Amino acid sequence: MLKRLIQVSNNLKMKHKLLISYVLVVMVPVLIVGLAVTAYFRQQALNNAIEQTINNVDKIKSQTATLLRVPTDISNILMFNKDLEKIVNTRYESVMELTRAYLAYKDFQEYKRQYREIAGIRFYSTNPTLINNLEIIPVDQQTKDSYWYQKALTSTSIGWFYIPNKEDNPVHKLSLVRKVPFPEYRTEGVLMIGINQDELNELLRQEPFETLITDEQGYIVAAKNTELVGQTLNQLDFGIDLQNQVKGTLEADFQGEPSNIVIDELNPSSSINSLKVISVFATKNIVKDANKISLIGMSFMILVLVIALLLVYIISFLTSNRLLRLSRHLNKLALGDLNVTSRIDGNDEIGQLSRQFNYMVKSINDLMTQVVETSEQNTQLEIAQKEIKLKMMASQINPHFLFNALESIRMKAHIQGEAEIANIVRLLGKLMRKSLEIGSGKTTLKAELEMVRSYLEIQKFRYGDRLAFVIDIHPEVEKISIPPLIIQPLVENAIVHGLENKEGTVRVNISIYPMDEVIQVHVKDDGAGITPERLGDVMQFICGPEEQEKSRIGLRNVHQRLTLTYGEPHGLQIKSVYGEGTEVSFTLPAGGNQHV
């Protein structure tokens, strides 16, 4: 399969390859990324809306629970109200007696006046001598058959119901309903406290999305759109049974539009049933801005891609046309036309090929007219090269001969009692052998410092008391591997530029020790030092592009090898005070690991 693709690719023309490559490498990935980003922004907008809705629903639950606590507390008080107990259980002989009792009982009106959350209070009693005064109401058959009344009689706990009755003075509000037993009279009644509808609706009025509160029968007891109050969930066009849905988030069509619905339950204190809080938002309203931005972005992206495709086509056409002209010239040359000349302009690769083609044709003509002369020159050149090679071989010095000669000199000096000269010759031989043995491999800090010590001893012999040195290396780091000739150029630089430019004794201190997961290497001298301007030039040279300053080539080489091996943080650091000395330092990874 891969071979087939390669073959098909090789058979395509250059401009077709460029166009297909652009489509596959640029257009398709960009469009895929654009669609993915669009989907991501759309989903983020939905998630943010859902999260906001959930927070709003929680807030509504908290506020509603606070509002319902007032009628709950009132019902708890009325459960043990002796005046209420007496008035609803007394058998009245006349209407006058009943009227006086009604006028004397003001508790219901006082609670309604004191608490704005209360729309009204009713008490339903089975006492047949009572008369309906819109507060204390004798129970009729319609009331006995109602769902809320029967539900209330099952427990003394609180029930919350929307009362859609058809009485002369209907309730049509969310109401607290609970049974009030009177053990002393062996009777019972049902207390109803209606909630102020405006207070409930006010909780939802500021919500950004359509929000409802429903009871257990599905009646809407409060809504942002107040026209929905009193309707049931089945009357609304949700397409699903929300009444039996548990707490959570779901997707459905509301009034013909895809929507997200957040459902939560509110369980008031001491209640036998719960209320549902439902918040609905249309998906298109949430993702409208994200879709608009995505559409603008995709349109701009497609426009840019089309313009780029046009430019790629033009460039591919011009490129393939120039290659075709060069191919025609090559065909003429292949047929023997040595006077052909390519006139393809430009400084790109095709223009260079065109000029090289002309150079090639000219060279062929020159070669054909000068074949005899060239053959003779080649013969003479071959003879000259052999002579040069012979001279070079004769002038080469065998390193073993050099080492043996130095050893002979050392032994001669030793025999004659010149111990110092013998030691210096030994160190020189050791230094030269180490230098010749170093290849492209690694060495250790210990081996590097042995070479540095040999170098310093030789320089000590040369300068005498003018040079003093100290080498201090921590035993833990002696076996760490490093590139060869890293420290020796720094020491050499300290002596050349520090000692030779200052009178008196110059001290060179070399210290190597571990610190904070790296190995610190310091080469410090108290020589002539460097001026700030010169120090800036040195740092620019060793860190910048290659130049022709030979005096600092060793530092540049060391810095480049350190940064290439271990990374930029491990390059050379130079501190200097003019007239006081210079310190060159660098760091190594604690394990000697190379930079990847």
Image: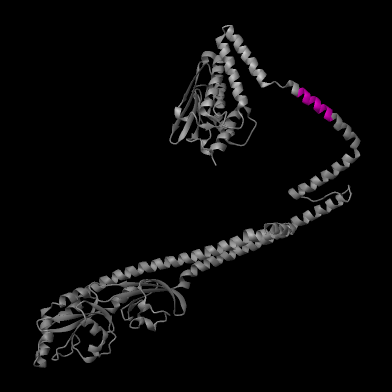
Residue at the outermost bottom position: 94
Of 486 and 206, which appears nearest the observer?
A: 486
In magenta, the rendered stretch is: 381-392
Disc tally is 0
Which residue is located at x 76 percent, y 47 percent?
Answer: 352
Residue 385 part of the magenta-drawn span: yes
Q: Which quarter of the picture shows residue 198?
A: bottom left
Left or right of 263? Residue 397 is right
Q: Look at the picture and state if 293 lies above or below 338.
A: below
Residue 501 appears in the picture as rendered: no
Q: Look at the picture and state if 401 lies above or below 90.
A: above
> Residue 265: where, in percent of width, then height?
32, 72
Q: Look at the picture and state if 59 lies above or below 105.
A: above
Of 444 and 201, which appears nearest the observer?
A: 444
Residue 130 part of the magenta-drawn span: no
> Residue 313: where, in percent of width, then height?
71, 60
